[in-house]
Amino acid sequence: MRSTPSHHRDVELHETDILAWLREEDSARLEKLWALADDTRRAHVGDEVHLRGLVEISNHCIRDCGYCGLRADNRGIARYRMTSEEILGCAADAVRYGYGTVVMQAGEDYGIDTDWLAGIIRRIKADTPLAVTLSLGERPIEDLKAWREAGADRYLLRFETSDRALYQTIHPDARGQVSDRFAILAQLRRLGYEVGSGVMVGLPGQSYESLAHDICTFRALDLDMIGVGPYIGHPETPLGQGNWSPPRADGEQVPNTELMTYKVVALTRLVCPEANIPSTTALATLNRAEGRELGLARGANVIMPNITPPRYRRLYEIYPAKACIDETSPASHTGIAAWLEAIGRKPGCGRGGRAHGGSRT
C-alpha cells in the first residue's frame, strides 16, 4: 500500500479553471501546471512507467470516420489480418521485452471472429503473465462479454469528443446501429473491464469549451485509462483533404499542437489522479526527439511500444508517419529501461492496472 505524501494536495479544478488553463499562453504559468501535474502523478501512481506492447492485429474497418486512414472508403490501403500464431508470437515478444500488457488493436473489423479472438485471449492468459487490453471499436455486448469471460482485462474505446453534433459529423453510424460510445463504456464497466477512453486534441470543429467539457467528462466517467493525442490529418480522409466543414462556426478552434496536447495531458492528470495516462505515439510523431519524454514529465505514466511485425505496422496508417519505438529509436525495446532510468523514471512491474487510493493493482 502506498499513501499520498502529506506535502501533496490535490487541486480541485472546475470547468472554468480548465478552460482558463487551455487558453493559457504564459510560459511561466504553464511551468506551474507542468509541475503540479508531475507532482500529482508522482503522489498517486509513482515513478513507474507501465509498458504496453501494441499489436495492430487488423487494418480492416467497416466505418467511414472522417479522420481515420483505415476508413472503409480508403481504397489506397492494402488490408491485412494477422494470424493467431503471429499474434501469439507478438505476445511472446512482449514477455521477452519485460512488458506487462499486450494491447490488441484493430479497425472495427467483423472479420475478427468472436470465438477466434476469445481463443487467442485464453492462450495468452494461460501461457503468459500479461494483462490483455482490447481496442477493437464498437462491438456488440455479446462479443465484449465473451472476450471478458475469456480473460481480457481492459478495453479502450475513445469517445473522441463529447460534442454530440461534432461526433455525429465525423463518425457516421454503421450497420444500422446508432453510435453511442458512452453507452458502450458503461457496458464495459458492468462487465468488469478496466475502462479506457480519450479524445483527439485539435479536431476540426473542436472549441475550447468543448475540450474543457471533454476533460470534465473523463472525471465524470471515472476512467481507468485515458488517452489524449493531437489530431493529425490523413490525406485520404475528408478532414485531411480539407473538404469538410465543422457543424457550427461558433467557438474558437482548438489548435492540434504539441503544446495544447501537453496541457490536456496535465489537466487530465489533475482531474483523474489515479488513471493510467499514456504519452502517446501521436505526440511523439509531432516531436520525435522528446515528445514522449515531455509527455511523461507532464502527467503521463504509460508508453505503448509498437510490437506489430514491421510488414503490417506500415499498413496500419490511421495517420501518416507514425513514430514507433523499435530497435532504431533511442528508446528501443531492449534499451527502454535504461532510457527511463536516464529521465528519472523506471519500468513498471507486473500488469500495471489502475492504482486505487494509492495502491497498486
Image (cartoon, grey):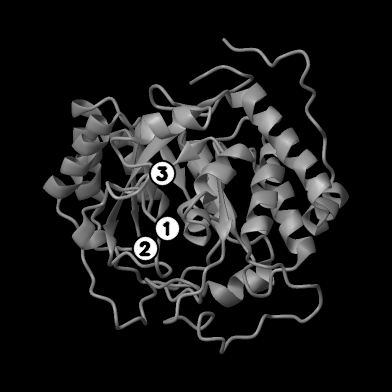
At x 34%, y 69%, the residue is 61
In the image, 36: left or right of 109? right
In the rendered image, the quadrant that contains the N terminus is top right
Is the residue under label 2 in contact with that under label 1 (CB below 8 Å)? Answer: yes
| Residue 108 - label | 2
Residue 184 at least partly seen = yes
Mark before the other along the chain sequence, 2 or 3: 2
| Residue 4 - label | none
Disc 3 residue type (three-letter)? Met
Which residue is under mark 1?
137
Badge 3 density bin: few <14, some 14–19, many ≥20, Cα 10 Å: many
Q: How far is mark 2 from mark 3, CA to CA?
A: 20 Å
Percent x, y of residue 306? 33, 49
Q: Nearer the viewer, residue 154 or 251?
A: 251
In the image, 50: left or right of 9? left
15 in relation to 174, above or below: above
Which residue is under mark 3?
304
Tag 3, which secondary structure?
loop
Tag 1, which secondary structure?
loop
